[in-house]
Image (cartoon, rainbow, N blue to C red):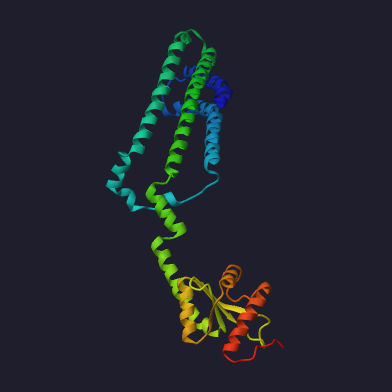
Amino acid sequence: TVILGMGMRPMLVSLAAVIERSLEGSAYVVEGTIDSLHDSMYPTLVQAALAVLPLLLAALGVSILAVFWQTGFLITTKSLVPNIERLNPTQGFGRMFSIKTAIKTGFDVLKVALVGAMVWFAAVDLFPQIASLPELDALEAAEAIGTMTYDLAIRVAVALLILGLLDYFVQWWKHAQDMKMSKQQVKEEFKESDGDPEVKRRRMQIARQMAMHRLSTTVPKADVIVTNPEHLSIAIQYDAQTMAAPRIVAMGADQAAFRIRQIALKHSIPIMERKPLARALFAACKVGQEVPTEHYKAIAEVLAYVYRLKNRAIPVAS
């Protein structure tokens, strides 16, 4: 609209001057030959094209800037690649009679109706000025037409601005609705992010089986099993020649604790009930970790009792 307001009057004045010179020149064309008609009309047409060229270039520039503002500098050949699916009549009819197409068509009809109404009311208001145009000379008529056209463009621009804002909020709302996930999509997303419950159960089962298998190789290394007595089992190993302190080689709760006791009985490893010690070690230690210093005395008593049972000398670190 700004470009139209700046360029309309000079363009119309130039066109009026071109038309005036053309009419004056036509009086000297006696014979209507092709050559004489070309010599008479060609300069006129060139001048007319030059008169409207700035406005056309400005409109082209605004259109290009609008596209860049929306999408940025984007060049793609994807739309040029042949796609046989575009010839599918089923998909074509589906797009033609979809709710999205109906809403877009209704909005386009609303645009045309609103712009048409604006043009009609503007024409009614400007009818006295239009009726007086034959009384004006060419330059005055061109200036009057430019003023009326600019006034009409302002009204149409206001209407399109209102429609543009309405369309923007409708598209924003639709985009927000499309981004919402259905209950099924939420379930699928949960499965992908947190894992399928069946797969998780299977994975946990395999992990338990592997843990039980490891117990079969680590528990036989223990010198004593300290228990809760039923819910916890801690397998402790101590070699004074290679270890600075007793080490936990295996521990477990409930089913794993029962499995540790089973393996200990199979390999004749002493099992001693020490509830406070078993709870403390289970809460504070991990498998492979040395026993904390605050539990040295309790562990020493347990190992001393075990060695007395086996009639072995109590090992002393070298």
Q: Quadrant of the N terminus?
A: top right
Q: Is residue 227 above or below residue 124?
A: below
* Residue at the image point whose x is 41% and y is 65% from the top: 201
Residue furthest to the right: 318
The quarter of the picture where residue 31 lies is top left
Q: Nearer the viewer, residue 64 or 170?
A: 170
* Residue at the image point whose x is 55% and y is 35% from the top: 61
Q: In which quarter of the image is the C terminus?
A: bottom right
* Residue at the image point whose x is 61% and y is 68% from the top: 284
The quarter of the picture where residue 14 lies is top right
Measured from the top left, where is residue 257 in percent x and y? 49, 74
Residue furthest to the left: 90
Measured from the top left, where is residue 150 in percent x and y? 52, 20
Measured from the top left, where is residue 20 in percent x and y? 51, 17
Is residue 20 something one can see in this rendering?
no
Is residue 208 something one can see in this rendering?
yes
Side of 41 where 292 appears, left or right? right
Q: How many labels does the image show?
A: 0
Q: In this view, does 265 lie above or below 117?
A: below
* Residue at the image point whose x is 57% and y is 84% from the top: 223
Q: In this view, does 37 lie above or below 172?
A: above
Measured from the top left, where is residue 77 in percent x and y? 46, 51
Q: Nearer the viewer, residue 128 or 24?
A: 128
